Every structure is written in structure tokens, then in C-alpha cells.
Image (cartoon, rainbow, N blue to C red):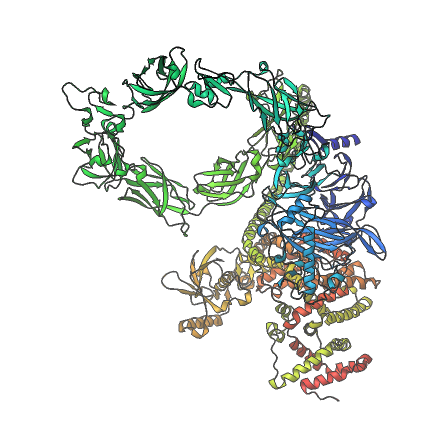
Amino acid sequence: MASWVSLLLLFFCQTVSKAQDSSSIHIQEFTSETPINNVVQDPQTGRIYLGAVNTIFQLGPSLNLEARAETGPKEDAQTCTPPASACQDTKLMPNLNKLLLVHPSNGSLIVCGSRYRGICSLLNLTNVEQQLYYSDTKGERTYVASIEESVNVVGVMSTYSKDGHTFNVFVVGKGYGTLDSAKLISTRILQDFREWVVFESIIEASTVQTTPFVPKYLHDFRHAFKEDSFIYFLFSRTLDGTDNKNLTFISRLCEDDHHYYSHTELQLTCGTDDQYNKVQAAYVASPGKELARYMTESGSYGKVDPWSKVLFTVASPDDDVTDGALCMYPLNSINEHLVNIISACYIDSGKINGIPAVDIPYLSKKEEFCTSKAAKDTLELFKCGADFLPSPLASKPKYALKAEAVVSKLGLLTAVAVAVENDHTIAFLGNSEGEVFKVHLTAEPYMYSKTPGDTMGERVNKNLFFDLSQSDLYITTEKKITKVPVQTCLEKKDCQSCVELKDPYCGWCVLEGRCTRRSECRRAEEKNGWLWSPRQQCLKIVSFYPPNLSCKKTQKVKINIPSLPAIGHSDRLHCTIDSFRSDGSISDSGQVSCDLPPPSLIQHTREDQDFVAVAIKIFVNDTVELAMRDFKFYNCAATVKKAENTPCMSCVASPWSCQWNTVDHTCSDMDDTAAGPTIIKHRQGVKCPQFENPDPVLIPVGYKTRISFEGINLDRHQSSGFTIGTELMKNVEEEVAFEDGPFYTFSGFNFSYDKSPETNVLFYVKDKESGKKMDSTLNVTLYNCSVGRQDCSLCKNADSKYRCVWCAKQRACVYEKLCVPDQQSSVDPHNTECPDPEITDIIPLFGPLQGGISITIRGSNLGIHKDDIVSITVVGEPCIHQKEKYSVSTSVVCEIGPYDPQRTHWGAVEVKVKGEKRGTSSLHFTYRDPILEAVKPARGPKAGGTLITISGKFLDTGSKDDVQVTVGGVDCFVEQFGEEITCRTGEYRADKVPSDPLTITMKYGKSTTKTIPSAFQFLENPTVLDHNPKGSFACGGRNIVVTGSGFDLIQTALIKVQGDNSLAIEHAHKKNDSIIQFWSPTVNHSQSQHLKTFIQLDNWVKELKPFDYHPDPTFNDLPKKVITEASIIIVTGRGFSKAMTAKEAQAFVGDVPCLVNTLQDDKLFLDPPSTPPRARSRRHRRDTRPELLDLLIKFGNGEWVVGSVQYEKKNDLSLYIIIPAVIVPMLLIIAISVYCYRRKSQQAEREYEKVKHQLENLEESVRDRCKKEFTDLMIEMEDHTNDLSEGRIPFLDYKNYTDRVFFLPSKDGANDVMITGKLDIPEARRATVTQALNQFSNLLNSKTFLINFIRTLERSHDFNARAKVYFASLLTVALHGKLEYYTDIMRTLLLELMEEYVNSKNPKLMLRRSETVVERMLCNWMSICLYQFLKDSAGEPLYKLFRAIKHQIEKGPVDARVKKAKYTLNDTGLLGDDVEYSVLTLQVLVHGEGPDVTPVKVLNCDTISQVKEKIIEQVYRNLPYSLRPKVDSVTLEWRPGSTGQILSDLDLTSQKEGRWKRINTLAHYNVRDNATLVLSRVLHTQQNYDQNQENHEERNALLEDDKVFHLVRPAEELDEIKSKRGSIKDKSMTKAITEIYLTRLLSVKGTLQQFVDDFFRSVLCSGAVVPPAVKYFFDFLDEQALKHNNVDEETIHIWKTNSLPLRFWVNILKNPHFIFDVHVSEVVDASLSVIAQTFMDACTKSEHKLSRDSPSNKLLYAKEISTYKKMVDDYYKGIRQMVPVSDQDMNTHLAEVSRSHTDKLNTQVALHQLYQYASKYYDGIIASLDEDPAAQSKQLTLRLQQIAAALENKVTDL
């Protein structure tokens, strides 16, 4: 077994070392099988510790696995309080690593996980498999981390001193989880000391926690560090819960602060306007000399020293998950700001420069802080705060420390590490795609590289750090840690590639010829010995002397190399030029000299060049190349090849030293010895013999023209003859004749050329004797008149310089001298008249009757100038010439006029030009009007883009440019013009959607408009609800399903992926009204992190968010080559699950698909093919063995061949024999047995099937109903949830809450004097009474008096239970100003009560009922203390439950008379008939409140009063119930026609059934769906006679006969009817039918279950916030129970139940109107009572024996009771393990409640009412006081008598 485990470990966790691109980069990596949470390094040994899910790995510095410790999965539960063995409902849960800290001083590793409430353990640093400490029995004080995955935890090692002892501790920063403690900062000890245990939180400070008992700051801790005796935490949080925007803060604590008084927070902003507001990671380092200098000079950071510390952070915006930035904050600036904040609070009322700069976080009251002005030296004396100074402190946003974004746009940055190399600073930035960028931090930071290695798009862990030598970087991604070098200098083999890196780590080590770090270059300190990469400089040869040399010579060359390092005597220099090598020498000036190679070793020049460039390389010490540059050897003889027509000029004007010999026409090297008139030296081109200036320069084609030209510098050639030629006339040369002076001439050529109107011709001149070319620049233009001038008009339009004429005989345009006129004709060709115009085409051929369109007439001889056109007629009607569109001779454009009905509608087109010449078309133009008939489609989205097709007759009248289409004013852009016209709609911008059916208008030209009315309607754009999946690989091809509605409108659906410089598009491949499916487009892999994905539906574009592109996966080669049909194929690789599922993936062995069984991120499990596969022809590997088949994996468009396999089919021959021999007899025996058995049991089976079928139908019915009802409820409750999220829960204020809880149940109810607050006291006595009541208040504050007062009352027989309750409530209000005193009285009386029950009664009955004053006092005390908890935590689920019940009940019929409902939880309130009804939506208009209507859903069986209630609730839903109009104060009017009808419950139209009258419903009035009703307020003073009359008649009708019913008549009446006419069978049938409806209870219960569970969880979850009063009182009960022997655990459970769930929660649950401003109807109350009863049952210890006779209400929740009981037990247990609430803390809390609310209560009224009891029992109280020595000593009797005298003139014994 052990060997198998080792093998698996090796398989999953091997360390891979690989070389990339065959270079020397050594990358080491380690892969974990589970996600990695935290990584730390031992600063002494360099070991790496990975905190992964369920495992801790110990790795060597090279990432080799040394040891591993399993930490999970563990048996646990969300609400479990350790030890887990005591918990129920546990399951295996993963253990995430939340905190990992190295504690080097004692060689331990601190490991905190997410299981068991975040308990920690200590492991051995040298072997993590050895656990040094772990305990799960020490309670809540040792819970360090959080069980919630989203809560981040950070920590830092520190020390703590107490009583001369110094301990190692770690300080923890932790966000808030719903089941965690509210502490944000805690200090944890690492040893047992006195009462402290390991991991205990040893500092009890209430300041730095999310109080009061509600989390609202949402801390996300990212980093913790220690510097100069301070501890710093970096985190983001919201300001106070009112805004969800995260802000970055750094907080600071003194290391020796034992109370966290010094905790001060400073906001850090990153980027302009805090663009990057949420910190992701941080690193603290020294900035280095260069960065410190830049930071200081910039003025933004203050003075920064190279050795001081800077906080480097990466942060991101809340609203953009693709961006991040690096910001820098000097620690000096942070500390300076923090000191200013503290100083401002202590000394200057919290202001800095007169502006408030200080805030107090985490406190509920903020109005009074920083008020005391302390002495100036307070800050010096109390640097770490004190208990009398305000704390904690924070900066206000205006005083945040601001920093600009240094680097951004590199993706979402998640990690940062900073290093300094040679005074320069490099930041390594990791992002969410797994990339780590290297950034050089300078005045202008730049990203110069990425780290090598493959991280496959996984988020880089925030723990990014270096090895101990700072040479390598550890990069952690989701499941892998990689060790990569910080630089790759040695990869680069030459200086240029080295400096192109721009890597601050690298430089070119000149004399060693290597790219290295400075420390690795031996002579780096010498000047120019190491050239730093970012400077972008290499050694360069600047110049040679001589700069070049003839290829026929050799000599020494001097080489100038600036910045050459010092060459020592021992250094050897040499040069190489191709294969030639020569030793080099260096002069004093630093120039290097080398010999050049002899001519024989120099390469020949190429055909097209006159030089050869040869590289001269300079080496030092044989192998190290210093510099290289090309040296040019020229060849003068080759210069003439570059311009053969000007050989002399080419020779002497070249860059080389060449000379020209005019005698033999040769170019040679400069020779100072050769001189004379025949030699033309370098740069003396003016002396070259040459020919130039031809005349004429224009030569016509086909006519031989004599050309003369000029010759210069021809003195030596007077006797020579010349010939002339050109490349255009190959092999034809003419003699040149000499004329006067320098002029020459020749007879010309008869050129032939028709490729273009003109071309350039260059002539060359040769010396006749030698046949060598002489310099000639004779360049003329050859032209052809006929090219491009096809007719007479075009010919006459030619430029006169060409002398072109229209030759009538040839019917062509020719050079004038080529036109030979006829013998008969003596007309000069220049004066030839052009023929009549000819019309060849008319565009278009059809036009509308009204004209107004342009037509184009094409032909020839249509004039020379636009003014030549005299007139144009179309079908005899004039056509207006548009001169600006005229083209000479070939084209005329005119605008036609309207059609003359008296003419024919078709005819010719005539053009008349100057000279009375006319041209008439053979084509006919036709006038006709288009006829529009149909349009499709008829609907489209308002965004436009719908392609409309318009059909009809003659639609192709005019041209595409003439037609304009609009749809109700919206342009429709014509795309196709013909027999049908298509156009694409633009955007519809009007407000009304859907639009009315709009007219389609087609405008032809200026005058003709055709329409199709009501042809097209713009509808709402489609709605996109969701898309799945939400990612794709770069290869694309994944099926993306977009869901929504309105897709049927869409014609064209595209998915587009936009990159930086790319766009990929795919069309939808499947579409219906609610679903569109696309294949994800293929994108460029390198751009995958900067892509945005859109869908375009016609013109409507929506970005798909989120949609991520991931790099394509990588596959490892398949190790297993042979497969059978029984084996499993395992394919390994990385990144599979990023954008693929097993269902989508495809695999093929040869041509047969195989099933992808399981897909993990690094593994694919494939089932082999069941049929023998064959090779795929198109993929067949070229292998001699045919049995080898490709294994192909296909993810979308991506295909990967991962290896070749051999498929072997098992030999099944033996099975063919075995199966028939064994199985067939067995089957016969079984068949006979089954036959016999089935015959006997057939009848029973039929009966069973029948019953089973009935049960299944019933179960299916209930299930379907539950599902439907729950779905409907969740959808319709969404509005209510939105209301809640917007803070619309109608909580009562404290006064109304206490009034209702204390006094609403009293006999006077809402009219109780305590609620109204009105006392009937004469004005004259008011001052006296007030004074006396104040004295009575003082008397009640005497504990002796109050105890005697209460005892006296309770001894009186007529002081009944109702009076006790009322008295206790009065006492609660009267003593509200001193709740601490009230609590003390309550404790005293409770102790007496406890003694009484424990000693003489049954202890379990204590607190069961309110039989004593103190029991009611306890109830009131709980109500007071839990008010805030109700508002903050439990109120929302309770309100949701109330709303859900109300909503569910009102969905079905509710009988207004018998108060029964179709949907209820209470069987006695169940409507036992199947009432037919339908849902109506009414459009309600409120009279006097504008034209807006409110849609209200009602039932047609609702009474008018019920309809009014629903309307009022919907219309006034934003008002609390008390501010809404009441049903009686409004009237409802229906206006079905011209007259209105007032609707009322009873009127003269009410139906009668015998003696019974049915209450009117909407169905009675025949009100239809979508009817409009008007709601009006009743103004009693202005009611008209008719209204009064109607009400009077209705009232009389009710008085006459009260037998009124709504939906069903009362049961006794029905029974009476049936007894008269029916049998006992009928009656039993009625009952049976009623019971059938009990399944509705189950349906309603299932629908409401989530809301019930949520409420129970909010009340019974000790892991969340527990009100301090509950903990305080439960501890009091536990404490007292220990003092009595006969109080067992069950009794304590009952006491707790009686004091909290029974006494408070049941009361609130049954009466939601005690805490909310709502109305609770009887039917809602009935259902609430069932839930309240369930809650009570859950809190009892006794088992509930259920039977068939048990009430339905008990049976309904029987299944859940056990779960709820477990919740109660865990709740009580969790509270017991919480940190105790001290008397001081409780009193502080009570004092805060007193201070906040007492002044709002009717205290004086309460005192007055209390005195009534004192008056009633006056004598007994006096007697009791007289018997009490303590009362006598305080003269309490006398004080009472004085008060009595003042209040009621009572005669006393004074």
C-alpha cells in the first residue's frame, strides 16, 4: 500500500525542471492537487511552505517535496462548535488554509484553517508531518480564522510583555464572516500562561471590531507587516455600510499597545480620483537610490531616502476587473499623516488646516469625538494612546494619502514584489491571467519583459517573493508554484540583443563578451567595462580611415571606437575580415589599427553594385568580439553600369575616388600621376563630354520628326562621328549630323506606340569609332493623338500643343500632318465640323410621372464644352442640363420634368448641341409611377438593422440614388434596387415603444412620394437575460447559448470579439424567440487578456459580461499505448476545465468517438470505443504499422493529437460457450418460478399498483403545486426584496414599538392612556402634580421602597395577572432612564422567584407564565434589549416571512365573512370548497393624483373591501400602514361606459339566496380584466344626497337581515340544510371532501419553507451576531443553576426557552405589528400562529408523540421539528461558549439605550398610572414600609405621605 501512495505522490506532486527554447533558463516548479491558498518562506533556511486546501506542503528552496501534512477534509458543519464529535449533521468539508506564519524562534509553523471555526495548530518547521500543538476544546477564545472562503486573514509575528514576562505572539487581521467573532484585530499568544491558553486572544478591546453587533464595513485584509515597533495592516473596506464602494486603508498599532488605543487608519488613494480603490496586494521594500531620487524630485512623495521603506501596492477599480495599477507610499509619509490625524484629534478638534480630517470608525454614535483639547505634549506623552483619549481614529476621505498610478493597463494586478539591483528598482507584477511583468521603476516606468514559464491564465497569488539570494522569484498560481530567475541575461549572446532587453539586471560585459549582471562581470568597475542594458549603448565603430578603399589596393586601416574600455598590456587585439586575420594595435588616442586583406582575398562586386561591403570585426583575447562594421571596397570600372547613358558622370560623381578617361572611355582608380586634358578627375562632372537640350521635346507617333540638340566638352571629338538610338527602337540607329557651333541634328524616327497618350523616350549617343556610349541626357515626350480621343469632340478638346485634328477620311484623331484630305474636299482639317451627336445609352430608362430625377445620357460628340449643350428633351419634354456633371463629348446629365398627359408616356431622348446638330436616341425612355404593394417583415427592433423588402410593380423606376425610404420618419438605407427594393432600418428614437404601425414612405427624386400606411412597427429591443457558458478557449468553437426574449424579431445575429487590433466574428447557428446559439470565435492567443465580447442583433449591440477567453489547454504525451474496450484512457495536461466540460469535449480513437467521462483541470478520463476503430484517412499517421491510431481530443475548434494508441479487442470465444451452457437453464428455472409466483400474487399486485398510482398522483400534484407556487412566490417576492434592499422595511420607532409590546394587549388596547399620552389634569394643578410625580420617581429609585411596593401588591388577592402585566410595563417605562437600576431590581426579584420554585415548587415551571411582576419585567427587558437586533438582523427575515404569508394567502380566495382562505397553514382556517376564480389586473387611477395608472392584481371573487385593501396596498406601497387611507375612507368607481358606477360590498343589487345575502364581488359587477377603476377619498362634509341615500339603504339592508355570506355559508347552516334533505352518507361525503383540501396546507408549507427557515436561522444562529443581553442573561441562569443541586440541564434549557423564545420571539412572531407598521389580518394571524407553535415545540425538550389523531398543524412541521430542535440546542451551546459579557459591558449597553430613547417615552404618564396603584394599596404599602428597618432609616413612609398629599390632597399623619 505504501508503495502505491508513494507512486501517486510522485505522479501528482513531482517537481519539474525544464529548459525553455533550448536555452539555459532553469525553471523549477511544484504542482499541488488542490488549490494553493498561502505561501511563506523560512527566512533562515529558505524552505517554502504551501498552505493548500486540505494539505500543507514543505518544500526545499528548489521546490523539491520534503514533507506534507494532511489537514482535511474534516467532518464539520457550518454552525458546528468544536469539538466536532459533539456536533450533528456534520459532513466531510474541505479545509482551506487561512493563515500560514513561520515562527522561527521555536521552529514552528502556525497553520490556521477554515474548519472548526478557524482553529490553528503548530507544526514542526523541519518536518510538517509532526504536529507540535492542537486543541479544539478551548472554546471561542481560540478561534483565530474564519470558516468562510471569502474572508481573508493576515498575520504578523510580534512580542508581548506582561508582568516582566515577554511572550511570542502573532497579531491577526481578519474580515468579518457571518459565523465569526466581530473582532477585526486580535493578538494571539503562542504558549499557556496563567489563565491564557495557546492561540487565545489576549487583548480584550472593544474598539477595533464591527460593533454594534452588525457587520457593515466588509473588511478585506491583504497584508500585514512590522516596522520600527509598529504593526501595520493593509485592507480595503467600505466607509460605513451605506455605500458599497471599497476604499483602501492602512492601519497602525504600537507593538506594545495592550488595548489597541493606538489603532489609527489612514485612507490611501491610488490613481486620479482614487480610480484604483481596492487594494489587492502589497510589498514593503527600500526604494533604491535612483527611485528615491526620482520620488524626492517629483515633489509628490516628500523626501525619500534610499534606505527608508516604501509601501508598494497594487490595486484595482471596483467596476473594471481587467485593470490594475501600482502605487507607492513612503512609510515616512504614512507615519506623518497618521501622527497628524492623532494630533488633530487630541489638540485641534479633529481638524487639519481648519478642515475636519478625523473620523471615528466602528461606533454607532459619532456626534461627539475629538472634543477635548488636550495639552500640546499629550501626543509625545501618549504616543500609543490612552483610555481617556479617543480611539480608534481614521482619516476622512479628504485627508487621504494620495498617490498617482505608476504602472497600469497590464490586466487585473494581483501580486507585487520589488527588488533593487545596482541602485535601480524593479517591480514584479502578477496579474489574474498568470502573467508576471517586470517593470523598471524610473521617472517614466516601463514594462520590459515577462517572467519565463507557463502559468496558463491562472491568477497569481498575492504571496510573490524572492529566494534568500534575491536571484530567483517564487510565483504561485492556483495549483502550482514556480521558481524562475529574476533575469535571463546569459540567454543573450551579443551586445545588441543584451541591450534590447532594457533589463536593469543586465549589461554587456565588454571584455568577456557576455550579457551578465554587474556582479558577474570581473572588470565591470573599469570605465566602459560593463554597458548597462537600459542605456541602449554598445561599442560601435564610428569611422574608418580611410573610409573606403579600391578593391585593387591594400593598406592599414585606422578604426575609431569611442567608449572603448581600457585595453591592458595582457589583452590581445586582432581584426578579422572574412577569412583574413591581422593583429591589431591601439594608439595613445584609443584608435585601433589593422591591416586590410590583399586584393586577391576580396570578393567580387555584384552585377548591380560598384562596391563590396566586408565586415571588419575586432576581437580581444582571441574570442571576445568588441565591435563590427562593414568596410567598403569599391570598383571604379563597375560605376558605369549604374547609368549606362551617362558613363562619365556616373564615374566621377560616385562616392568613390574614380577618374574618367575620355580617350578609351574607361573609369579607373584615382591616379595622381595620370593627368592631362583626357583625364577627368573625381567630382569634375562638368568637364564630361555630353549631349543635352533636344528640340523639339514633343514628338508625334507615326511621323518622322527631325530633332536637333546641343553637345558640350567635345573638343577632343571634333573629328569623330556619332550615332544615336533609343531602347524603344531596338537595333535602329541614325547618323548624327553636325551643324553650326555646338549643335547637332538627326532625322528622327518613325515611332509606333499606342499603350498610352504619351510616354518619355531617352536617346543614347555612341562614339562611331569605338562604339562606346557618351553621356546623353536627351529626353523627349512621344504622344499619340488617337489614344483616348475616340470621337471628333474629344479630338478637338485636345491641348493645341499636340496639334491633333479630326480626320474625316480616316474617322480618327491624328497628328495634323498625317491627315490627307480628299481630292474633292479642300476643307482644312482644323476646320472640320464634327458629326451629329450619337446617343448610345440612357440611365435610367424609367422615371416617375412627376419627374424630378436625374438621367445620364451617354454617347459621343456630345460637345466640347458644357456650354455647347443647347437643349435636351425627354419624350418631348425639356430636361434641365446639370452642367456640373458634364463630361466632354461622352456624357450629359439632366433632370427630367413632369410627364405631359397629352403626350405618349414613352419616347426618345434628343440632345441638341452648338451648330444646330442634334442626336436622337434609338432607346426609348418611359414615364411610369411605381406601385407599392407589400412590405415584409412588419416588425423590427427599435435599434434598427431590420432588412425590409418592399415589393410591387415598377419599383425600379429611376435609379438607386434617386430613391429615399423612410419608416415613420426613420431613415431606411437602400441596399438593393430592382424589381424588389430592400432597405435597412435606422434607429427609432421616439419614446413610444412599441410604436404605432408606421407608414413606409418611398420618395423617387424630388417630386414623387409613394406610401404604404401602417406597414411597419418598431418594438422593444430584444432582452438578453443570461449567457452560458461564460468563457471559451482561444481556439473558439464553443457553443454559447444566449437566453432572453424577443429574438424572433432579429434577422441577423452575430457574436463579435474585439481585440486591440483585431476583430473576430461568428454568425448564430441556431435561433428561436428565447435562445440564440453561437460558436465562440477563434481569437489570437496573445491578445486573449484584452478582449471584449459583444453580440450584435441587427443593429442592437450588447457586451457579454462576463465572458473570458482563456489560453488553449496543453496536453502531455499519452504514456499508455495499448487500450482495450475495458480500459480507461487517461489524458493529462493543464487548463482543461477553464472553458470546457465533459459534455462538450470530444475524443476520437481513429475514426470512432469515445465518451469523455470526467473532465478535471489536469486530467481527462475517456471510455474506450466499444467498436474497433480504423484510422482516419485525413489524419492517418505515416506509420508502417496500421494498428497505430491517433488519439484526437477536440475542444470546440481546437484539435490536438495527444498520441498514438493500439486498440486490442479481447478474445470472447470462451464466453460464447459458457453463456449458453449456464445462463439458459438458469433462465428457464427463473421463468417458471416467476410465472407461478405472479399467478398467485397478481390480484395483490393490482391492488398495490392502484394504491401506489393514487399516492404518486397525489404526491406529484402536491410537488407540482409547491414548485409552481414557490416559483411564483419567489418571482413576485423579488419586488419586495428590492423594497427591502432600498431600506423600505416599515420598522416602528422605539416609542411605538414599546407602546405596542407593553400596552397594546391591555384592556383598552390602542386607546390606553400610555399610548395616547393624554392625562386629564386640571391646568391649576399641573405644576404641583408634575413636581409630585418627580418626587415619586425619586422614591421608585429607592430599591427598598420599590421591593416593598411590589411585594405588597403581589400579596393582595385582587392584584390579578392582567394587573401584574400592566404594572410591570408601567414600571419599565418609569425606570427607563435608569435601565441598570431596573436590571438590578429584576435580578433581585428573579433570585427570590428562583429560590421559591427550586425549594418549594417544580423548578421547570419557572418563567412559564407571567404570574409575577418580575416575569413580565423580564419580558419587557428582553424586548428593550433586542430592539436593535430586530432592526439589524432578525427583522428582515421576519418581515419577508410575514410578506410571503400575506402574499400567498391573497393569491387565492379569502372568505371575508368566515375568515377562511384557500391557501393557509392553519387547518381550521382552510377554505373547504373549491371556489372558481380568476386573476384580474385592474388599472387604478387615483382621483386628484395625476394621470398615472397603477396596475393591481386582484381576484374576481374578492369583495369590494378586499379589492380596496389590495389597491391601497399597491398604490401606497411606499407608505407605512398607519399613513395609508383606510378602506372606509375611500370609494371605488368603475366606468365601463359614459357613466360611472360606485362599487360597494352591499347595495340594492346584491344577490339573495333564500334568507342569505351574498356580499358583492367584482364578478357580481362583471368587472373585466384590465378595467380602469377610480379610487377617491370620501369627503364626509361634501357627500351628496345620492351617496347618503345609498349608504342608508345599504345600512338598512344589513340591519334587516344579518345573514350575509361571501364565498361559503357557515357550516351549521349547511348541516341544517343537509339534515332536512340528505342522508348520513351525504354528511360524511361533505366531511371527506373537506379533508381532501388538507393537501393545500402541505403546498403552502412547501412554498413558505425557505422563509420560515431563514427566520429560524436568523434567530437561532450563535455563530452570527448574538445580542449581548441574551448572553448576559443565559450566563446568569447558568450561574444560578450551579448553586442549586436539583437543577439539571433540562431545567436550564426550559428556563432559557421560557425567558427568550417563549417570552419574546413567539410574541413578536405572532404579532408582527409590534415591530412593523403593518396590519395583520385574521387569516394571516392564523398561519403565523402555526409557525409560532412550531417554534415553541422546537424549544421544548420533550419528545412529541405523533399519531393519526394529532392535529394537522402539528403534523405539518413534524419532519422539521428535529432539525429546529438541533438548532436550538446548538444555539444554547454556542452562547455558552461565547466570551462572557461583563456587568460593566452590559451596563454600558443599557445606559446607551436609556440615553437614546428615554426622552421619547411617556414617563410622566407612567408615573401617574403607577401612583394609582400606590393609592389603591396605600395602607398596605405604608404598613410594609413601617415594618422595614431600612425603610424607616430612609424615611420612606414620610416621603410617600408627602407625595400623596400633593397628588390627591390625602390627609396624612404629618
Horizontal and vertical percent position of residue 1013 = 32, 46
Pick the front one: 564 or 1733: 564
Q: Quadrant of the C terminus?
A: bottom right
> Is 1038 displayed left or right of 144 in the figure?
left
- 1308 vs 972, nearest the viewer: 972
Residue 174 visible in the snapshot:
no
Q: Where in the figure is residue 1812, as x and y percent of width and height?
A: 68, 80
Q: Residue at x 81, y 60 (%)?
A: 1688
Give percent across and percent down for residue 540: 61, 29
Q: Quadrant of residue 687?
A: top left
Q: Is residue 467 above or below residue 763?
A: below
What is the tally of numbered marks visible in this picture? 0
Up the image or down, 1401 lies above or below 1690; here it is below
Question: Which one is in front, 1057 or 1431?
Answer: 1057
Name the foreground residue: 66 vs 578.
Answer: 578
Q: Choose top left, top right, bottom left or bottom right for residue 25.
A: top right
The residue under the point 63% across, 38% down is 435
Q: Position of residue 1347 (x, y in %)?
A: 76, 75
Is residue 208 positioned above or below 1847 on the image?
above
- Figure check: 1550 above or below 472: below
